[in-house]
Each structure stands twice: as C-alpha cells, then as structure tokens.
Amino acid sequence: MVTAAQTLPARPKLTHAELFTGFFQAGVMGFGGVLPIIRRMMVDEKNWLTQMEFNELFSLCQSLPGANVVNLSFAFGTREAGPTGAAAAALGLMSAPVAIVLGLAWLYGHYGGLPPVRHALLGLAATAAGLALGSGLRIAVPILTIPRNVLLAATVYGLAFGLHFSLLLIALLVLPVSLGLAWRAVP
Amino acid sequence: MSLGLLGQLALLFSKLSLLAVGGANSTVPEIARVVVSQKHWLSASQFSQFYAIANAAPGPNVIIVTLLGAHVAGLTGGLVATAAMVLPAGITAAIVASMFDKHREARWRRVAQAALLPITAGLVLAASCVLAGQSDTGWLTAALTILTALLTWRTKLHPLWLLGAGALAGLLFL
C-alpha cells in the first residue's frame, strides 16, 4: 500500500490550461460521481496534492454549502491561479457533463425503455457505488488512525446512514464536540 | 415571458446553492419539493427519471439542475440553472479556502481542520453506503459493488475499466 509523503516537493503554480484539462478529464470520466476520479487525478496521477492535503481541502469544501467537487474546483483553482483559475477549473469540470447530460436526456427519451440499456445501467450503477465506497475508504483510512477520529467518524456514519439525520443536524450535533476535542488535542 | 422564467430559475437555484449543505445528493429532496410540489414544473415520476439520467451521465450529480432548467426554459434555462446552482457556493468555497490557506499555521485553522476531518470520513462512507443501498438490487450487483470497492481501495486500476466491466456484467447477467 502506497502512502503518500507528508508534503510534495515544491512545484510551480498550475496554469489555466492545466487546471482546465485536468478537471475536464475528471468531469468526462466521472460516471456515478466525480469524487473518485478527482481524487485519483489530483493525488495519484498528477501529484498536485498529497492524500492528506486532498483530505483537508475536500473536508473544507464538504462542510460548506454546494456540490462538494464543484466547490473543490473553485477552491483549488483559486489557490493555483486566482479567480480566473477557479473559472478554468470549474468550466473544465462542468462543460462536458452539462453537454452530455442534455444529450443523454434526449437519448433516454427515445431508448431508455429497452431492456439491454436498463440492465447495463444497473451494472453501471452498482459499480459506481463500489467506486464511491473504495474512494471513501481511501479518504477515511488515513484519518482513522487516532481513536478520537474513529469515534467521531463512527458517530457521523451512524447518524447519517443509520438514522438518516440531515447534514445540518449532524453538523450541529457533532461539530461542537469535534471542535472541543480538537481544541484540546491540537497543540 | 421566458425572461421571467429564467429569472425564477436563477433566483431559485442560487438560493438552493447556498442551502445545499452536504452536496447535491442531500439537496435533491429539497429540490424535488420545490420544483414538483411548489412550482409544478414537472411530475414526481419525471423528476425521478431526470435524477437517474443525471446519475448515468458523467460529472457531478448537481447537473440534475441542468435538466430541470432545460425542461422549464430550454437550453438557456439549463445553463442559467447550472450557473445559479454552482456560482454562489463555489465563490464562497473559494473565499473560505483562501482564508484557510493564508492562515495555514494559525491554531484556529488547524483546530477547525482537525475537527472537520473525522466528520468527512464518516460522511463519505455513509454517502457511499447509501449509494450502494440504492444500486444493489441483488447478489450480483452487491458483488459488483464490493469487488469494485476493494479494487479501488487497494489498487490504482483506472475507474473506466471497472465501470465498463460493470456495465458489461449488467448487460450479460442481469
């Protein structure tokens, strides 16, 4: 199992073209959710961030309103190349999916009822769920190395998956506790 | 007339954008409530078809608002709805993230980050289990999910191979 180094060697800031093409590829390939592809692209392929840096940025974006990966493209684009960098990353991420979904809506209207299409879509959906779970493990396992985090993550998991609490409610319940524990633990 | 509709789309989705804590998927019920029960732009079954299409398409699931906008006011409507859904939250994220970057070493920032990480871990695992629960209709789909999860976790195999294999398995065996 490869564990990324704590910090990567310094690299020059990314250009607008690099941001656009990186996020464009992730958008085009992100079937069933872009998080697995984005994580792979940024951490494994392009070494833009370590897994832990990715986790930090992603958890910030997740705690703010909006679509997580879209927020990530805005935040990362800004960090690399300012507001226009955010535009490059977000446009890269969104342009192809927006065009494709409009095309798919048309196709589905014509052929969606055909059994082979339905069956392939079922298989696709199950695989996409596996991808989400796998990248969830990639994100969670490095975080779950201290007991405090295991306990908090298990609580959040139980509230979200077991009891179907809304995210707002979970944040209101867990965040104060988590902040309090972190306040005592972080030097 | 259609400008009025575009204005409504822009207003509605920029409002939802800032309320969408937890990402697109946790906001879908709220979106459905507004566009189906309140605005009567489409039926509940049309909405769930749009949801399935948005999931089958590549890209962030937030593109369901592209379909809703296009349904209501054509191509322009789709683009306006998408921009409205993405911009307010995205700009907020960019501002907060650069504030965090500026204060990398500040203690409040490290405390906030340390507090958010375990919540993220719990949420990503819960979200993927919800997704698995929706997609796994039998032993074959469940096996596909588990196998894919293990391969994604332990190897660097490209997701497109896995997705292709999954679609093929569905075509042949389901």
Image (tube, rainbow, N blue to C red):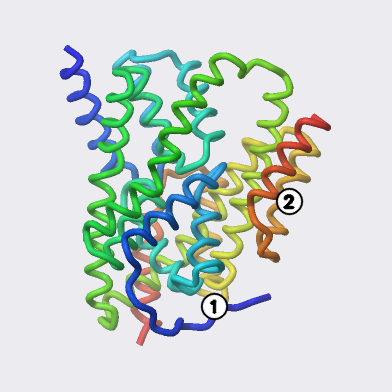
List x then y, in percent, for residue B163.
Answer: 67, 44
Select label 2 or label 1 by which is in front.
2
Near-viewer residue (B5 or A9): A9
Q: Residue at x 75, y 42 (%)?
A: B142
Q: Is residue B38 visible?
A: no
Most extreme residue toward the right is B173
Q: Is residue A95 above or below residue B124?
A: above
Query: In the structure shown, which secondary structural element does the residue marked by tag 2 occupy?
Result: helix
Most extreme residue toward the front is A17
User: In the rendered image, which quarter is residue A78 located in?
Assistant: bottom left
List x then y, in percent, for residue B83.
Answer: 27, 38
Q: Residue at x 32, y 35 (%)?
A: B82
Q: Is residue B56 visible?
A: yes
Q: Is residue B19 above or below residue A172?
A: above
List x then y, in percent, for residue B170.
Answer: 76, 34
Q: CA distance from mark 2 to mark 1?
A: 26 Å
Q: Residue at x 65, y 36 (%)?
A: B135
* Residue that numbered label 2 is attached to: B146
List x then y, in percent, for residue B42.
Answer: 39, 14
Q: Are marks 2 and 1 on the same chain?
A: no
The amino acid marked with disc number 1 is Ile
Give the class, few, some or many, for how many residues have Cα within 10 Å of label 2's Cα (few <14, many ≥20): many
Q: Residue at x 52, y 63 (%)?
A: A153
Quarter of the C terminus of chain B within the rendering: top right
Give the class, few, some or many, for how many residues have Cα within 10 Å of label 1's Cα (few <14, many ≥20): few
- Please, which chain is the residue tagged with disc 2 on? B
The amino acid marked with disc number 2 is Ile
On residue A146, the disc is: 1
Query: In the structure shown, which secondary structural element does the residue marked by tag 1 occupy?
Result: loop
- Please, which chain is the residue tagged with disc 1 on? A
